[in-house]
Image (cartoon, rainbow, N blue to C red):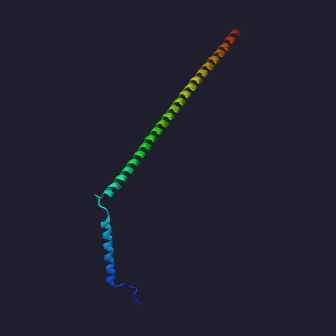
Amino acid sequence: MKSLKKDFNERLTTAADAKKALLEKFKARPSVDDPAVAERRAEREAVAKARDQRLAERGITRAAEEKARLAAEEKARQEAHVAAETEAAEREAREAALEIERKVARDARYAARKARK
């Protein structure tokens, strides 16, 4: 029966083969000057540029929407302010008219009292 344990030399050989395979794998990688690498880099840059452009357009759109919303809010606030001022002016006019009516009634009572004496 064969021993299940590998002897020391076999383990050294296996480790050396693994190191060689790793080195070959590393050497097989394309260099920076490789046209395929440059093409992939150009594609990634084009995709990134397109993404950045979409994000910028989206930001511009959101900024325009926010500006329009703020302008609408300001307009509504101004309209509410004008309405409040108009209502206050009408209230003051009613109060002034009521005060005049009270004064006329008071003067009429005073005149009637003077006429009775």
In percent of the image, x 56 and y 25: which residue is there? Answer: 86
- In the drawing, does residue 21 fall left or right of residue 92? left
Camera-nearest residue between 2 and 112: 2
Relative to 10, say whether 26 is above or below. above
Residue 108: x and y in percent read 67, 13
Q: Quadrant of residue 60?
A: top left
Relative to 14, say whether 73 is above or below. above
In the image as oriented, which residue stretches furthest toward the right? 116
Q: Quadrant of residue 9?
A: bottom left
Relative to 12, say whether 40 is above or below. above
In which quadrant of the rendered image does the N terminus lie?
Answer: bottom left
- In the drawing, does residue 112 fall left or right of residue 17? right
Camera-nearest residue between 66 and 102: 66
In percent of the image, x 37 and y 53: which residue is there? Answer: 43
Relative to 42, say whether 99 is above or below. above
Q: Is residue 117 visible?
A: no
